[in-house]
Amino acid sequence: MRHGNKNNALGRKKAHREALLSNMAASLIAHKRIETTLAKARALRRFVEPILTKSKTDSTHSRRIVFSYLQNKEATAVLFRDVAPKIAERSGGYTRILKLGNRLGDASEMALIELVDFNEVYKKETGAGAEAKKTRRSRRSPGAKAKATPEAKAEDTAETKGE
């Protein structure tokens, strides 16, 4: 029984599972997106999100802790050099899992796991060309309420008569 057991064993012993997640996390950091099974993607998300949070503070201690999980110098360097500055203002939810359908050979559910800030398709535009969305609650224009008062009507009629 798995009462209160939150980890997915993925059909592997502990050492094999940790090596698998470590390698997948290093690949995710290097390539910014990987394709895997849905169960592995969900397990990887739980493994890599705390590592990404730890990378936001660039100190020797946090680098050593991240390296102890990843066991990969290049992935650790890329994480602190490229990924950490992009996720600095994000408070969590660094990864996104997209379901891809079933694999042809064994009908296993496949998924794409990616780093959210590195996908240009879903990124919100926050540049000079992008405008902030305005919410309209009624069909009337914003100035219609001010002009509807009797004083405003009197002023409008006086202006039109004077011209």
Image (cartoon, rainbow, N blue to C red):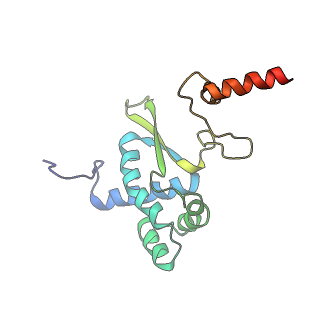
7 to 159, vertically: above or below: below
14, 149: nearer the viewer = 149
110, 97: nearer the viewer = 97
Extreme residue toward the bottom, this view: 60
Rendered residue at 74%/46% (across/down): 128
Left or right: residue 106 versus residue 163 is left
Extreme residue toward the right, this view: 163
99 to 117, vertically: above or below: above
**Res 50 quadrant in image:** bottom left
54 to 153, vertically: above or below: below
Rendered residue at 58%/52% (across/down): 31
77, 60: nearer the viewer = 60
Q: How many numbered badges does the structure rendering display?
A: 0
Residue 71 place in picture, x, y as percent: 46, 68
Residue 82 place in picture, x, y as percent: 61, 61
99 to 55, vertically: above or below: above
Left or right: residue 78 versus residue 17 is right
79, 121: nearer the viewer = 121
Residue 147 place in picture, x, y as percent: 65, 27
Rendered residue at 28%/49% (across/down): 8
Residue 101 place in picture, x, y as percent: 44, 29
**Res 163 quadrant in image:** top right
